[in-house]
Image (cartoon, rainbow, N blue to C red):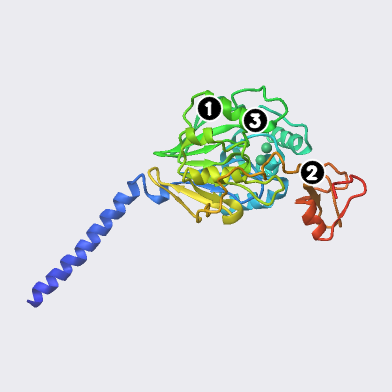
């Protein structure tokens, strides 16, 4: 009996080792192994966009937050051991998407920089062009239908579809669909009604598991028609303190009506979606949409007042308009109400709203 028991024990130990070794081996070649997974980091940069994508040690960044997000973005990328970005996509030339782009170009090695063909005449945009030229980088124009590979994943450009949107830079946003196995992620920058109509009319594949709501959750971006074409299971809203009414109540109620699990950077901070190729998991808890008003609200983007946005500096005691010459590089975006509550007074030179 004793010998038999010992034999069983030896056999058991042997079996554990054998099976353990076996399962380790199968895991390392399994495409759904979490270590081979693609990660999409919706970095919390407040009222702006910056998304880091990693697959198989390859990285790509979509947009670079606002001017005051330089440290946040550069540090986040360094923490995640990024040295090279295979792709750097700048959806459109608004400051809340290209704000820290010069820092990113100066800090990391860049494979391809893909930028909206629409230009802007702001200081931050011109500085970016100078930085790109100094680094001898060539700008790649987005061509609808073009596909690129990033590690295990692939992305396809589907917008902009026109250069006739007048002065609304949002509509010139690059749109792209990122695919990892059976999982898909959609990015539309700040595209609004006109651009979205063209995207839908172009009949490209939009169906995706995760939608980054365009334009920080404005109702002009997340429309009922767009949701019908994308049919997302999950939505992410990259949003922070703002005076535009983002995210719009009508966006939230549409997401609720369509049973879409929604994540918000202003509630969750940075949100990481992990895609195994067959399954997507989120690092954060979905937002509670039960309070979303399903009737149309009057607090929408059109009625909110853009002139409420003002800027303060680290050292001054006045608040300013964005173009004021008294503003230094360290300007921080805020609202008139917040600035006044914090004891700031309106600048006498640029005379912001009071
Ligand atoms: Zn914009
Ligand atoms: Zn924006």
Asked if the residue at tag 3 contacts the one at tag 2, i.e. Cβ–Cβ closer than 8 Å, the answer is no
Between the C-alphas of marks 2 and 3, the distance is 22 Å
Between 67 and 14, the one nearer to me in the picture: 67
Q: Residue at 71% of width from left, 25% of height from top?
A: 166
Image coordinates for residue 218, horizontal then vertical, percent: 63, 41
Considering the numbered disc 1 on the image, is that residue within a helix, a strand or a loop? Answer: helix
On the image, the x and y values in percent for residue 135 come to 68, 36
Specify which label sits upstream in the sequence, 1 or 2: 1
Of 273 and 84, nearer the camera is: 273
Q: Which mark is residue 189?
A: none
- Residue at image location 77% in from the left, 56% down from the top: 338
The residue pinned by badge 2 equals 307
Label 2: how many Cα within 10 Å (few below 14, some 14–19, many 20+): some
Mark 1 residue's CB less than 8 Å from ligand 1: no
Q: How far, Cα to Cα, is label 1 from label 2?
A: 32 Å
Say whether marks 1 and 2 touch (CB < 8 Å): no
Where disc 3 sits, the SS reads: helix
Which SS class for mark 2?
Answer: helix
Left or right: residue 127 versus residue 353 is left
223 w.r.t. 280: above or below: above
Task: From the top left corner, tell me how far across and down residue 193 is, in percent.
Answer: 62, 31
Q: Distance between the residues labelled 3 and 1?
A: 13 Å
Q: Quadrant of residue 209?
A: top left
Toward the front, the furthest residue is: 295
Q: Is residue 46 or residue 327 the one in the foreground?
A: 46
Residue for badge 1: 200
Q: Is 149 situated above or below 20?
A: above
Residue annotated with mark 3: 171
> Please, which residue is most extreme toward the left here?
1
Disc nearer the start of the sequence (3/1): 3
């Amino acid at each position: 009996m004793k010998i038999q028991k010992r034999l069983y024990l030896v056999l058991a130990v042997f079996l554990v080792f054998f099976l353990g070794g076996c399962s380790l081996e199968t895991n390392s070649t399994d495409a759904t192994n979490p270590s081979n997974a693609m990660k999409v980091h919706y970095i919390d940069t407040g009222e702006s966009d910056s998304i880091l994508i990693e697959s198989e040690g390859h990285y790509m960044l979509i947009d670079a937050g606002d001017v005051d997000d330089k440290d946040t973005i550069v540090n986040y990328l360094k923490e995640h051991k990024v040295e090279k970005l295979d792709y750097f996509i700048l959806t459109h030339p608004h400051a809340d998407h290209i704000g820290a782009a010069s820092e990113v170009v100066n800090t990391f090695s860049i494979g391809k920089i893909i930028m909206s063909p629409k230009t802007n005449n702001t200081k931050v945009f011109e500085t970016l062009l100078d930085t790109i030229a100094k680094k001898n980088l060539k700008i790649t124009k987005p061509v609808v239908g073009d596909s690129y590979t990033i590690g295990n994943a692939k992305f396809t450009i589907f917008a902009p579809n026109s250069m006739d949107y007048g002065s609304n830079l949002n509509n010139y946003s690059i749109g792209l669909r990122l695919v990892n196995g059976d999982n898909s992620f959609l990015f539309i920058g700040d595209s609004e009604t006109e651009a979205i109509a063209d995207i839908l009319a172009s009949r490209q594949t939009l169906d995706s598991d995760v939608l980054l709501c365009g334009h920080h959750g404005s109702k002009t971006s997340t429309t009922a028609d767009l949701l019908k074409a994308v049919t997302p299971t999950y939505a992410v809203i990259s949003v922070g303190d703002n005076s535009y009414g983002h995210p719009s109540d009508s966006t939230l109620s549409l997401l609720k009506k369509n049973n879409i699990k929604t994540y918000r950077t202003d509630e969750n901070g940075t949100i990481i979606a992990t895609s195994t190729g067959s399954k997507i998991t989120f690092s954060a808890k979905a937002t509670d949409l039960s309070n979303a008003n399903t009737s149309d609200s009057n607090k929408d983007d059109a009625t909110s007042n853009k002139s409420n946005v003002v800027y303060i500096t680290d050292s001054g005691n006045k608040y300013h308009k964005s173009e004021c010459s008294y503003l230094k590089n360290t300007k921080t975006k805020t609202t008139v109400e917040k600035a006044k509550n914090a004891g700031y007074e309106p600048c006498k030179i640029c005379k912001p709203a009071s």
